Image (spheres, rainbow, N blue to C red):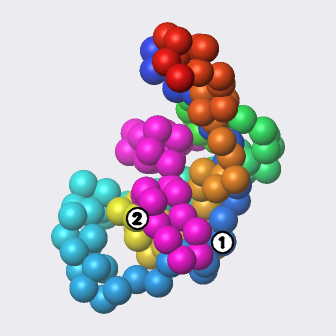
């Protein structure tokens, strides 16, 4: 069954978890309280697996990814249920981080880090989607 969701292709890089921005202790408490939907008895193993599959995906195909292809890569790696949903979330709401600034994905980054992952796929900070660079003539004539 093909997923209907169509997003612009995304480009990812493999990012070292050790280079995530520092966590403020109060922030960790807040994120942990808000992460209840990401935390189950098996989530540590699942998050570690999700992170490993995400880096495998980037290694196998460093160019742009379509959502259907990303999802299928996870399914082919054996991800199912919550783990598959969490893997898909790395595409739909990618982790966006630099060594000194978070843009998106901090809630998922915490369980990934706590699971012991060393690397995870994040949105390439140097990537600019094609729709951003298209000329003004493609947006209804506005300039």
Q: CA distance from mark 1 to mark 2?
A: 14 Å
Q: Element at badge 2?
A: helix
Image height check: is 68 above or below 52? above
- Whether residue 44 is visible, yes or no, is no
Judge by depth and name the residue closer to the eye, 132 or 107: 132
The residue under the point 70% across, 59% down is 14
Image height check: is 28 above or below 52? below
The residue under the point 31% across, 57% down is 38
Q: Circle 2 is placed at which residue position? A: 106
Q: Element at badge 1?
A: strand
Res 75 quadrant in image: top right
Furthest residue in direction front, as rendered: 143
Is residue 99 covered in magenta? yes
Q: Looking at the image, tell me whether mark 1 or mark 2 is earlier in sequence order.
A: 1
State the extent of the magenta-drawn residues as a range: 78-105
- The x and y percentages for residue 16 are 66, 72
Is residue 58 covered in magenta? no
Q: Is residue 40 left or right of residue 108?
A: left
Q: Are marks 1 and 2 in contact (CB under 8 Å)?
A: no
The residue under the point 66% across, 42% down is 128
Image height check: is 54 above or below 91? below
Image height check: is 110 above or below 43? below
Q: Circle 1 is placed at which residue position? A: 16
The disc placed on residue 110 is none
């Amino acid at each position: 069954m093909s997923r209907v969701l169509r997003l612009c292709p995304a480009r990812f890089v493999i990012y070292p978890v050790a280079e995530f921005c520092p966590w403020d202790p109060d922030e960790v408490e807040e994120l942990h309280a808000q992460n209840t939907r990401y935390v189950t008895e098996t989530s540590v193993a699942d998050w570690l697996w999700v992170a490993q599959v995400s880096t495998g995906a980037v290694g196998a195909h460093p160019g742009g990814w379509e959502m259907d292809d990303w999802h299928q890569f996870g399914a082919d790696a054996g991800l199912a249920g919550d783990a598959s949903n969490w893997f898909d979330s790395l595409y739909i709401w990618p982790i966006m981080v630099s060594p000194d600034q978070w843009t998106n994905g901090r809630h998922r980054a915490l369980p990934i880090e706590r699971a012991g992952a060393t690397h995870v796929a994040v949105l390439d900070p140097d990537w600019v989607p094609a729709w951003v660079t298209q000329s003004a003539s493609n947006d209804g004539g506005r300039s």
